[in-house]
Image: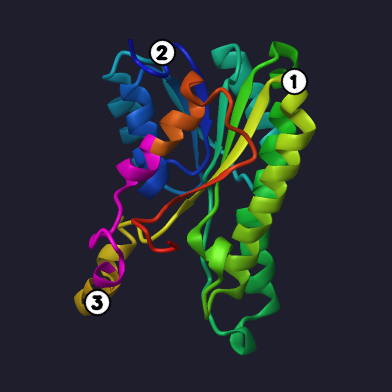
Amino acid sequence: MKLLENKIALITGASRGIGRGIAEIFAKQGANVAFTYNASAEAAAALEAELQQFGIKAKAYKSDASKYDQAQLLVEDVLKDFGSIDILINNAGITKDNLLMRISEDDFDKVIEVNLKSVFNLTKAVIKPMMKQRFGSIINMSSVVGVKGNAGQTNYAASKAGILGFTKSVALELGSRNIRCNAVAPGFIETEMTEKLDENTVKGWRDAIPLKRGGTPEDVANVCVFLGSDMSAYVTGQTINVDGGMLT
């Protein structure tokens, strides 16, 4: 029996990186996957075709999670196409790193809008259908940076820390309706973004991690499978660090 057999998952920002890894593992575990992309239609079409090979239903939607109206329309479309939404994964996110004295107001606002407001937008949009079916698992992608902070990332850290408070509050509000809400805080995850970094820098990071390696999108996806499945039926309001022991 696959852990997510016949469940319907909506994943934002899934055309690359961690989001793509989650979509792939969810499909392997039997979930039907609706996912969003913002820019790369080509990558989204390729992922849609790849996911369908696992014998599940998969569909890509062009949607900007940071826009309230687009989030509402997206959820309506997914409900029309799939019938329900059992799992929401708020994964869409960006970085615009700089020291605080150099961050522009626009770079601060944009990161908060894409990383934090998108979580509000999508969560608000799925609440009614989830309450109606008296079931749901909401998984919000935070970061170890949101847990401990990081120099040069005040905007990113604020957005990811905001997700933690939001997650706990949603868990308290919706627990009586059997809707769970948890956060995942990845550490140093190696994706196409980290491939562009200097090899010595990456080696330094790996050496500082107790498990002596960077994480993979699959490492994060497996925790999401647990949180999306019935195995975590009594887990809500939690933040799970997937960081190889960085914050230990």
Distance between the Cα atoms at labels 2 and 3?
A: 41 Å
Magenta span includes 220? yes
* Residue 177 image label: 1
Q: Is residue 228 above or below residue 155?
A: above
Magenta span includes 29? no
Q: Which residue reaches farthest right?
A: 173
Say whether disc 2 or disc 3 marks the residue closer to the N-terminus: 2
For the residue pair 245 and 1, the one nearer the viewer reads as 245
User: Under tag 1, what secondary structure?
Assistant: helix
> For mark 2, does the 10 Å Cα neighbourhood hold few (<14), some (14 to 19), or many (20 or more) residues?
some
Where's residue 134, x and y in %?
70, 14
Q: Which residue reaches farthest bottom?
A: 101
Distance between the Cα atoms at labels 3 and 1?
A: 48 Å
User: Under tag 2, what secondary structure?
Assistant: loop
Distance between the Cα atoms at labels 1 and 2?
A: 22 Å
Image quarter in which the C terminus is found: bottom left
Q: Report which quarter residue 126 is drawn in.
A: top right
Q: Report which quarter residue 101 is drawn in.
A: bottom right
Q: Which residue is mark 2?
A: 5
Q: Report which quarter residue 57 is drawn in.
A: top left
Q: Which residues are magenta?
A: 206-222
Q: Which residue reaches farthest front?
A: 248
3 and 1 marks in contact (CB < 8 Å): no
Give the amino acid type for the residue marked by disc 3 in the picture: Asp
Say whether disc 1 or disc 2 marks the residue closer to the N-terminus: 2
Q: Is residue 126 left or right of residue 95?
A: right
Where's residue 213, x and y in %?
24, 60
* Residue 198 image label: 3
Give the amino acid type for the residue marked by disc 1 in the picture: Arg
